[in-house]
Image: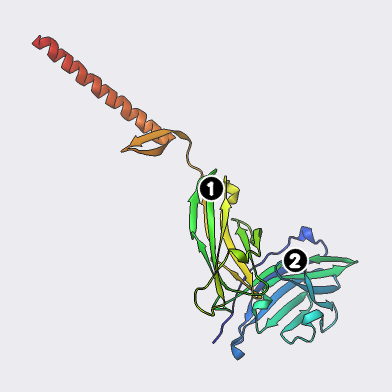
């Protein structure tokens, strides 16, 4: 039994972005169809306002231009599909007042992409911010491992994130992307791509195996607080996109550094509170030492 899992991030524009029609685009499992052990995914697009008359759906695969999926007039019952989506029973549009949902049945790896819902009025087309759809579990020969799972450093330090990929060798090669999902951000943003660097990979030693192992590093130098977040590595290969589980990067500032403690040969950073305690202990120790020296000196004088 082959089950397909989908991972996604979504966002909704604020009313300031579209004063006449507000698009609220989000994605969720509307229904799970177990006929033929396949999933059906519904991408929802809700809109408010009376100005928009035409609505559309676009699909944008990684590193490709957006492709028009469908258009529908506000008062029409059925949508018009284009290109490879025309006469494709896997794609359908559910439309009614304030609703323009895109349904994709029999989810495949090639469905992985960013989907945009758009509205048109007065020769102006406006879009929601899109939904990234990532279909997992399609190929058992493809995996992404990220190390470390988490890392905690101070501002100004450097760290290297690691992404190890096991993937099939394809004629079109593969591309690797890095995303960062910062705290308070609604969706990850792409920060770096390695492009096609298949020459860096090592092919499997097993005879006849089409798999290869590739290692990619993302160095982050002179870190600041704004670099904190979860970093995801993703590989696009053989018509599929697979994400790693992510590396959480925490960046913490320490207290005001006032000095150092030398203890057993190790250097430990002392904060302002530590220094106050050290000064007090130093005064006490000095006082005790002076008292001992005074007593010893008096004993010496008496015996003399």
Q: Which residue is drawn at 57% across and 77% down?
A: 210
Q: Which residue is drawn at 15% across and 13% down?
A: 298
Q: Where is residue 111 in the image (x, y as percent from the top left)?
A: 68, 77
| Dot 2 or dot 1, earlier in sequence | 2
- Checking the image for residue 128, the label placed there is 2
Q: Quadrant of residue 122?
A: bottom right
| Residue topped by disc 1 | 158
Number of disc labels: 2
Is residue 147 depicted above or below 154 in this figure?
A: below
290 over 279 or under it: above or below: above
Residue 293, position as x, y percentages in the image: 21, 18
Residue 160 visible at all: yes
- Pick the residue in front: 26 or 249: 249
Q: Residue farthest to the left?
A: 303
Q: Is residue 51 visible?
A: no
At x 39%, y 39%, the residue is 268
- Crowd tier of the residue under label 2, counting other residues whose Cα lies within 10 Å: few below 14, some 14–19, many 20 or above: many
Residue 39 sits in quarter: bottom right
Q: Are marks 2 and 1 in contact (CB under 8 Å)?
A: no
């Amino acid at each position: 039994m082959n089950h397909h899992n989908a991972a996604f991030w979504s966002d909704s524009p604020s009313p300031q972005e579209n004063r006449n029609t507000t698009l609220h685009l989000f994605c969720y499992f509307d229904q799970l169809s177990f006929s033929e052990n396949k999933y059906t995914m519904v991408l929802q697009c809700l809109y408010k306002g009376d100005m928009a008359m035409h609505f559309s759906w676009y699909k944008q695969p990684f590193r490709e231009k957006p492709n028009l999926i469908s258009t529908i007039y506000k008062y029409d019952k059925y949508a018009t599909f284009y290109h490879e989506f025309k006469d494709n029973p896997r794609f359908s549009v559910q439309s009614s007042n304030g609703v323009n949902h895109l349904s994709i049945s029999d989810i495949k790896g090639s469905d992985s992409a960013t989907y945009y819902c758009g509205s048109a009025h007065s020769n102006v087309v406006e879009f929601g911010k899109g939904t990234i759809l990532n279909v997992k579990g399609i190929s058992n020969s493809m995996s992404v491992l990220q190390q470390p799972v988490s890392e905690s450093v101070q501002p100004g330090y450097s760290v290297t994130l690691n992404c190890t990929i096991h993937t099939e060798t394809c004629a079109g090669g593969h591309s690797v992307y890095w995303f960062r999902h910062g705290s308070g951000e609604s969706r990850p943003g792409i920060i770096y791509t390695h492009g096609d660097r298949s020459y860096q990979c090592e092919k499997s030693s097993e005879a006849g195996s089409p798999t290869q192992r590739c290692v990619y590093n993302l160095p982050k130098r002179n870190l600041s607080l704004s670099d904190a977040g979860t970093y995801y590595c993703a590989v696009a290969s053989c018509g599929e996109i697979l994400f790693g589980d992510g590396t959480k990067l925490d960046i913490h500032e320490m207290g005001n550094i006032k000095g150092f403690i030398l203890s057993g040969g190790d250097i430990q950073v002392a904060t302002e509170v530590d220094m106050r305690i050290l000064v007090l202990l130093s005064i006490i120790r000095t006082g005790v030492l002076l008292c001992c020296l005074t007593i010893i000196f008096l004993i010496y004088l008496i015996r003399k």
